[in-house]
Structures are given as C-alpha cells and as structure tokens.
Amino acid sequence: MSLTTSGPGGEDTETQTNVIHVDAGVETERFVTSIAGTTGDSLVYVTYVYMSTKTSYIGIYSGKESHSAFWFSNVNIPQGAQVVSAWIKLPASQDVSSMCTARVVGFAQDYASPVSSLADWQSRPRTNATVLWNMEPWQKGKWYSTPEIASIVQEIIDRTGWRAGRSLAFSIGPESGTTGYRALYQRDQDYFSGAELTIDYLP
C-alpha cells in the first residue's frame, strides 16, 4: 500500500504493509532518545566512514554519494509493541536549498552497534520497510524531522530476538536521481547536536 502522509518531515510517500488503528481513549507512550556518544553517528562517504568530522551529509556532496548513519542505544521499547508514530530529528549545519531526495532505512538487527567501517555498513541487513524523504530547504541552526518511519521501527522490534533496552540503527542516503545534499551536525559538534529519535507506541 502506498500512502502519502503529512508527517513530521512534510508530505512524503511511504510504502506500508499494514495500517495502524488506535482505539479512541487509548493513550500511547512516548520514548525519546538522542545520540549518546561521538561514535553514535557517522558519515559514509566514498570508501570511508567518518565518525569525528562534526558535520555529516545526506545526498550528493562534491559529486559523491553521502550517507549518514545513526545509532540509538538503550531503546526501551518492548518486543512486539505497536508503533504508532516515529521520526528522527536532525540539526542543520548549512543553509542548503538544492533538490535532495533521500531514503531512510533501518538495519535489521536484534542488537545493532555503531557503524565502524565501509564494509560493516555495506554488509548489514536492511529492513524491507523504507521511507522516501523529499527534503525541504534547510537553514543552519534549525532542526528537521524525517517523515513517518513507524514501519521501519516496527519491523525491527517485531523481530523475535529484539528486547527492550537494545539499540536501533538507521541509514539515510540519496535516492537515485537526486543531485543535491543536506548538511547536519554530528554529535561531535557538541552535546546538544546529536540526532534525536522519537517513538510513540502502545506496549
């Protein structure tokens, strides 16, 4: 099923296999976490993975594909919980308005670790669920949210090996045909610059 949603990151198209219905009067719980350390986010650029550059990129930067990976530890969501909504929020490090379309994917692992090398990033299994992100113009210092990524999070926490308190990891990179990029601060910039993950769920 293809849905056009006006989620946290604007109007985008997401492919889902199930539609979540929440009964009236049922209250969701919210889990919010940020990148905890300087190894929690990384830039995958050409044949290298950079963890301490203070700035990362998504899209086509200097003519090369740029992917940003994010690792969120201690995600206290129980196995099989119903994910109602989820998104990642990123801090812009440059004013950029060029056309940029990205794709968000999760790493299909029970206990993900930070991305440590190009081979590590390339070899990891990806979630079947992905989300297209038509990225709006960014202004330095502002925060921007992905579209709805509940389907990605749901796929990971539905795994039989998932347990509350484990880690989730994601990668955001250019969609085929995109020509622009977006620049964001890594956690290395300062304590308050790490990407933020929010999950609304029913236990």
Image (cartoon, grey):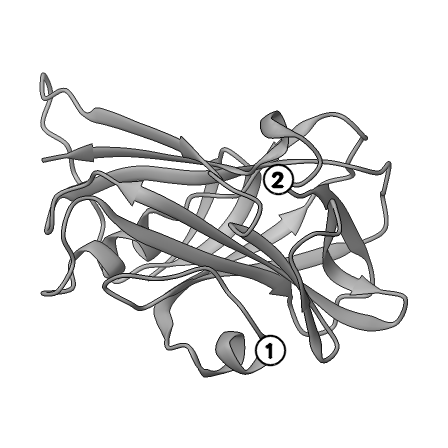
Residue beneath the point at 76% across and 49% down: 182
Q: Left or right: where does residue 128 sit relative to residue 190?
A: left
Q: Quadrant of residue 180?
A: bottom right
Name the residue at the top extreme: 25
Quarter of the C terminus within the rendering: top left
The answer to which of 139 and 133 lies nearer the viewer is 139
Q: Are marks 2 and 1 in contact (CB under 8 Å)?
A: no
In what element is the residue under mark 2? loop
Name the residue located 84 percent from the left edge and 38 percent from the top edge: 94
Q: Counting other residues with Cα less than 10 Å from the Cα at mark 1, is it few (<14), some (14-19), or many (20 or more)?
A: some
Residue at the far right in the pictured view: 62
**Compared with residue 119, is residue 168 higher up or lower down, i.e. above or below?**
above
Give me the C-alpha separation between circle 2 and circle 1: 20 Å
Amino acid type, callout 2: Arg
Q: What residue does disc 2 label?
A: 187
Residue 64, x across and y down, in percent: 81, 73
* Label 2: few (<14), some (14–19) or many (≥20) C-alpha neighbours in 10 Å: many
Q: Nearer the viewer, residue 178 or 78?
A: 78
For the N terminus, the quadrant is: bottom left
Is residue 28 rendered to the left or right of residue 87? left
Which tag, 2 or 1, sits closer to the chain's start? 1
Residue 67 appears at what percent x and percent y? 65, 64
Q: Quadrant of residue 117?
A: bottom right
Residue 151 vertical placement versus 29 (above, below): below
Q: Position of residue 43 (x, y in %)?
A: 67, 60
Judging by the rendered image, the residue that carries numbered circle 1 is 118
